[in-house]
Image (spheres, rainbow, N blue to C red):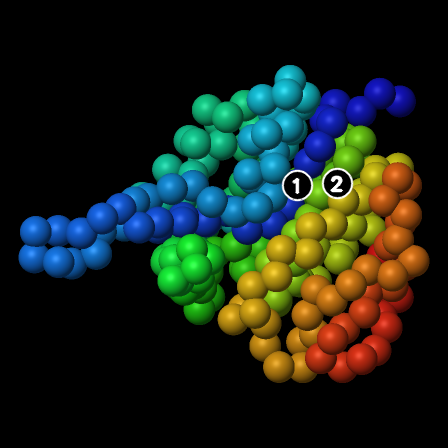
Amino acid sequence: MEKKYDVVALGEFLIDFTPAGSTDSGMKLFEQNPGGAPVNMLTAVSKAGLKTAFIGKVGDDMHGNFLVETAKQAGIDTRGIVVDDTVFTTLAFVTLDENGEREFSFARKPGADTMLCYKEVDADLLRDTKVFHIGSLSLTDEPARTTTFQAVREARKYGAVISYDPNYRASLWKRGNGTPGKCESCNFRTGRCRRLYSRSTGTKRSRYF
């Protein structure tokens, strides 16, 4: 059966506040930008003419509304975005070190993206896509962590190729909760990832995928 979507992604959708100069009094200025690696990827795929959709959660606030509208303008199907008035949209403040490398400070305690429950996921999106993409940031906190694993299982059951981006941000990982680590026994062509190696515990977990 022909699938409706070429790529569906689940993960973080947030505001990147990037440096934008200083005021006359020397105070730093930051520019509001849509961010989140899964949505960045979908934007590129949509521009290439493919059909995309996003699953995630934002707050019912000025930033969340901005993000939903931005996704629509990029041609991404937004039916899977949950707008929640009980949590605030995740924010990331970006600075550059002396070598030009980015450093991130997250306002995410909790952020809306971490609070996505599986019962809020539109399962039809998982069943009707050729590729299902996730990143590591949705694995840092519950309930988004469990939701991500459940979504992967559902998408694979309906034949989707699974794509994983280990977009590591050290400050977001709690002790004992593992890290994205390295995927072993992966076949990216078929999307099979049988074991995820945890740097913090040194164990291999195979039950999720």
Q: Amino acid at mark 1?
A: Ala
Residue placed furthest toward the left: 25
Specify the quadrant of the image occupied by residue 194.
Answer: bottom right
Residue at 38% x, 58% y is 96
Q: Position of residue 65 (x, y in %)?
A: 38, 39
| Position of residue 129 in the picture relative to residue 113 (left or right) | right
In the depicted view, which residue is nearer to us: 52 or 16?
16
Residue 9's disc number? 1
Label 2: state its secondary structure.
strand
Is the N terminus in the top left, top right, bottom left or bottom right quadrant?
A: top right
The answer to whether any part of residue 208 appears in the image is: no
The reply to whether the C-beta atoms of the residues labelled 1 and 2 are less than 8 Å apart is yes
**Where in the figure is residue 67, as x and y percent of width and height?**
43, 39
Tell whether 157 sits left or right of 89: right
Q: Position of residue 57 (x, y in %)?
A: 52, 49
Q: 51 or 165: nearer the eye?
A: 165
Depicted 129 relative to depicted 186: above or below:
above
| Mark 1: secondary structure | strand
Name of the residue lying farthest toward the front: 99
Q: Which residue is mark 2?
A: 132
* Residue at screen point 37% across, 58% down: 95
Rounded to the nearest angstrom, the CA distance separating label 1 from label 2 is 6 Å
Q: Is residue 82 above or below residue 26?
A: above
Q: Amino acid at mark 2?
A: Phe
